Image (spheres, rainbow, N blue to C red):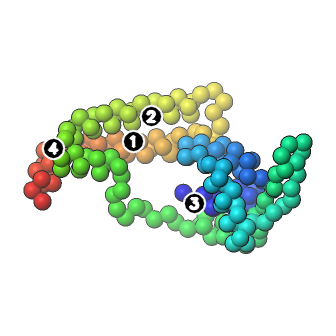
Amino acid sequence: MSVRHILLGLLASRSSHGYELKRRHDQCFPQARPLAYGQVYTTLQRLVRDGLAEVDGTASDGGPERTAYRATDEGRRELARWASEIAPPSPSVTNEIFAKVVASILTGGDAEAYLRSQRAAHSDRKGELTELKTAPGADLTTMLSADYVLNHLDADLRWMTTTAARLTTLTTEIRTT
Protein backbone atom coordinates (compact mmCIF):
# COMPACT_ATOMS: atom_id res chain seq x y z
CA MET A 1 0.00 0.00 0.00
CA SER A 2 1.39 3.39 -0.95
CA VAL A 3 1.20 5.65 2.12
CA ARG A 4 2.23 8.52 -0.12
CA HIS A 5 -0.78 8.07 -2.37
CA ILE A 6 -3.18 7.33 0.47
CA LEU A 7 -2.25 10.59 2.22
CA LEU A 8 -2.41 12.41 -1.10
CA GLY A 9 -5.93 11.05 -1.59
CA LEU A 10 -6.94 12.25 1.85
CA LEU A 11 -5.49 15.70 1.08
CA ALA A 12 -7.27 15.79 -2.28
CA SER A 13 -10.60 15.43 -0.51
CA ARG A 14 -9.90 18.26 1.97
CA SER A 15 -7.13 20.27 3.57
CA SER A 16 -5.79 18.60 6.72
CA HIS A 17 -2.99 18.74 9.26
CA GLY A 18 -0.86 15.73 10.16
CA TYR A 19 -2.78 14.68 13.25
CA GLU A 20 -6.06 14.76 11.34
CA LEU A 21 -4.53 12.83 8.43
CA LYS A 22 -3.49 10.03 10.74
CA ARG A 23 -6.94 9.92 12.31
CA ARG A 24 -8.64 9.89 8.89
CA HIS A 25 -6.26 7.20 7.61
CA ASP A 26 -7.01 4.95 10.57
CA GLN A 27 -10.73 5.58 10.10
CA CYS A 28 -10.76 4.97 6.32
CA PHE A 29 -8.42 1.95 6.50
CA PRO A 30 -9.44 0.25 9.75
CA GLN A 31 -7.78 -3.11 8.95
CA ALA A 32 -4.52 -1.55 7.73
CA ARG A 33 -1.44 -1.17 9.87
CA PRO A 34 -1.89 2.12 11.74
CA LEU A 35 0.43 4.91 10.64
CA ALA A 36 2.97 6.38 13.00
CA TYR A 37 2.81 10.16 13.33
CA GLY A 38 6.43 10.38 12.21
CA GLN A 39 5.56 8.56 9.00
CA VAL A 40 2.70 10.98 8.33
CA TYR A 41 4.89 14.06 8.80
CA THR A 42 7.81 12.62 6.81
CA THR A 43 5.45 11.75 3.96
CA LEU A 44 3.91 15.23 4.07
CA GLN A 45 7.37 16.79 3.78
CA ARG A 46 8.12 14.64 0.74
CA LEU A 47 4.79 15.47 -0.89
CA VAL A 48 5.53 19.19 -0.47
CA ARG A 49 9.12 18.74 -1.70
CA ASP A 50 7.83 16.93 -4.82
CA GLY A 51 5.19 19.57 -5.54
CA LEU A 52 2.28 17.21 -4.91
CA ALA A 53 1.04 19.03 -1.78
CA GLU A 54 1.39 22.51 -0.37
CA VAL A 55 0.90 24.30 2.92
CA ASP A 56 -2.64 25.60 3.24
CA GLY A 57 -2.03 27.66 6.37
CA THR A 58 -1.42 27.33 10.06
CA ALA A 59 -3.78 27.69 12.98
CA SER A 60 -3.66 27.04 16.69
CA ASP A 61 -7.35 27.08 17.70
CA GLY A 62 -6.30 27.41 21.33
CA GLY A 63 -3.92 24.46 21.14
CA PRO A 64 -0.58 23.80 19.50
CA GLU A 65 0.05 25.38 16.12
CA ARG A 66 -0.86 23.03 13.31
CA THR A 67 0.06 23.31 9.66
CA ALA A 68 -2.63 22.29 7.21
CA TYR A 69 -1.77 20.84 3.80
CA ARG A 70 -3.70 20.38 0.58
CA ALA A 71 -3.06 18.52 -2.66
CA THR A 72 -1.80 20.58 -5.59
CA ASP A 73 -3.13 20.19 -9.13
CA GLU A 74 -0.01 18.11 -9.87
CA GLY A 75 -0.80 16.03 -6.79
CA ARG A 76 -4.35 15.41 -8.02
CA ARG A 77 -2.99 14.32 -11.42
CA GLU A 78 -0.49 11.97 -9.72
CA LEU A 79 -3.27 10.56 -7.55
CA ALA A 80 -5.51 9.98 -10.60
CA ARG A 81 -2.64 8.28 -12.45
CA TRP A 82 -1.86 6.01 -9.48
CA ALA A 83 -5.52 5.19 -8.81
CA SER A 84 -6.07 4.13 -12.42
CA GLU A 85 -3.07 1.75 -12.53
CA ILE A 86 -4.01 -1.92 -12.39
CA ALA A 87 -2.33 -3.57 -9.42
CA PRO A 88 -0.49 -6.56 -10.87
CA PRO A 89 -1.21 -9.93 -9.31
CA SER A 90 1.72 -11.13 -7.25
CA PRO A 91 4.20 -12.89 -9.55
CA SER A 92 5.59 -15.05 -6.76
CA VAL A 93 4.78 -16.58 -3.42
CA THR A 94 6.04 -14.44 -0.58
CA ASN A 95 3.67 -15.64 2.08
CA GLU A 96 5.09 -16.25 5.55
CA ILE A 97 2.86 -19.28 6.09
CA PHE A 98 4.24 -20.98 2.97
CA ALA A 99 7.81 -20.21 4.06
CA LYS A 100 7.20 -21.66 7.53
CA VAL A 101 5.73 -24.87 6.11
CA VAL A 102 8.75 -25.36 3.85
CA ALA A 103 11.17 -24.50 6.68
CA SER A 104 9.37 -26.96 8.94
CA ILE A 105 9.69 -29.71 6.36
CA LEU A 106 13.37 -28.93 5.77
CA THR A 107 14.18 -29.07 9.48
CA GLY A 108 12.06 -32.11 10.34
CA GLY A 109 9.48 -30.02 12.15
CA ASP A 110 5.79 -30.85 12.37
CA ALA A 111 4.31 -28.98 9.41
CA GLU A 112 0.94 -30.61 9.97
CA ALA A 113 0.72 -29.31 13.56
CA TYR A 114 1.80 -25.88 12.39
CA LEU A 115 -0.93 -25.83 9.73
CA ARG A 116 -3.54 -26.92 12.32
CA SER A 117 -2.49 -24.11 14.66
CA GLN A 118 -2.40 -21.57 11.85
CA ARG A 119 -5.87 -22.62 10.67
CA ALA A 120 -7.17 -22.13 14.21
CA ALA A 121 -5.63 -18.63 14.34
CA HIS A 122 -7.18 -17.77 10.96
CA SER A 123 -10.56 -19.08 12.10
CA ASP A 124 -10.38 -17.00 15.27
CA ARG A 125 -9.54 -13.89 13.24
CA LYS A 126 -12.46 -14.60 10.89
CA GLY A 127 -14.77 -14.69 13.92
CA GLU A 128 -13.42 -11.35 15.19
CA LEU A 129 -13.86 -9.70 11.80
CA THR A 130 -17.34 -11.10 11.30
CA GLU A 131 -18.34 -9.76 14.69
CA LEU A 132 -16.77 -6.39 13.88
CA LYS A 133 -18.53 -5.98 10.55
CA THR A 134 -21.92 -7.09 11.88
CA ALA A 135 -21.78 -4.95 15.02
CA PRO A 136 -24.53 -2.38 15.35
CA GLY A 137 -23.34 0.90 13.87
CA ALA A 138 -20.51 -0.63 11.81
CA ASP A 139 -19.74 1.79 9.00
CA LEU A 140 -19.28 0.83 5.36
CA THR A 141 -15.50 1.31 5.45
CA THR A 142 -15.24 -1.16 8.35
CA MET A 143 -17.47 -3.65 6.55
CA LEU A 144 -15.57 -3.40 3.26
CA SER A 145 -12.14 -3.73 4.86
CA ALA A 146 -13.33 -6.66 7.00
CA ASP A 147 -14.73 -8.36 3.88
CA TYR A 148 -11.42 -7.86 2.10
CA VAL A 149 -9.46 -9.48 4.95
CA LEU A 150 -12.06 -12.24 5.34
CA ASN A 151 -11.71 -13.19 1.68
CA HIS A 152 -7.93 -13.37 2.03
CA LEU A 153 -8.25 -15.47 5.17
CA ASP A 154 -10.58 -17.82 3.29
CA ALA A 155 -8.03 -18.16 0.49
CA ASP A 156 -5.28 -18.91 3.04
CA LEU A 157 -7.50 -21.51 4.72
CA ARG A 158 -8.19 -23.22 1.38
CA TRP A 159 -4.45 -23.26 0.65
CA MET A 160 -3.68 -24.69 4.10
CA THR A 161 -6.25 -27.45 3.63
CA THR A 162 -4.81 -28.36 0.22
CA THR A 163 -1.25 -28.25 1.56
CA ALA A 164 -2.11 -30.43 4.57
CA ALA A 165 -3.55 -33.02 2.18
CA ARG A 166 -0.31 -32.96 0.17
CA LEU A 167 2.21 -32.90 3.03
CA THR A 168 3.50 -36.43 2.53
CA THR A 169 4.26 -35.83 -1.15
CA LEU A 170 5.56 -32.33 -0.49
CA THR A 171 7.88 -33.57 2.25
CA THR A 172 9.31 -36.25 -0.05
CA GLU A 173 9.86 -33.74 -2.87
CA ILE A 174 11.47 -31.07 -0.69
CA ARG A 175 13.78 -33.45 1.15
CA THR A 176 15.03 -35.08 -2.06
CA THR A 177 15.96 -31.82 -3.78
Residue 166 visible within the image: no
Q: Amino acid at mark 4?
A: Gly
- Camera-nearest residue between 163 and 64: 64
Q: Earlier in the sequence, mark 2 or mark 3?
A: 3
Circle 3 is placed at which residue position?
2
Q: Amino acid at mark 2?
A: Lys
Q: Earlier in the sequence, mark 3 or mark 4?
A: 3
Labels 1 & 3 near each other (Cβ < 8 A): no
Circle 4 is placed at which residue position?
108
Q: Earlier in the sequence, mark 1 or mark 4?
A: 4
The mark closer to the camera, 2 or 3, is 3
Cα separation, mark 1 vs mark 4, equals 28 Å
Element carrying mark 3: loop
Circle 1 is placed at which residue position?
154
130 over 22 or under it: above or below: above
Labels 3 & 4 near each other (Cβ < 8 A): no
Q: Amino acid at mark 3?
A: Ser
Q: Earlier in the sequence, mark 2 or mark 4?
A: 4
Circle 2 is placed at which residue position?
126
- Camera-nearest residue between 157 and 8: 8
Residue 74 visible within the image: yes
Q: Earlier in the sequence, mark 1 or mark 3?
A: 3
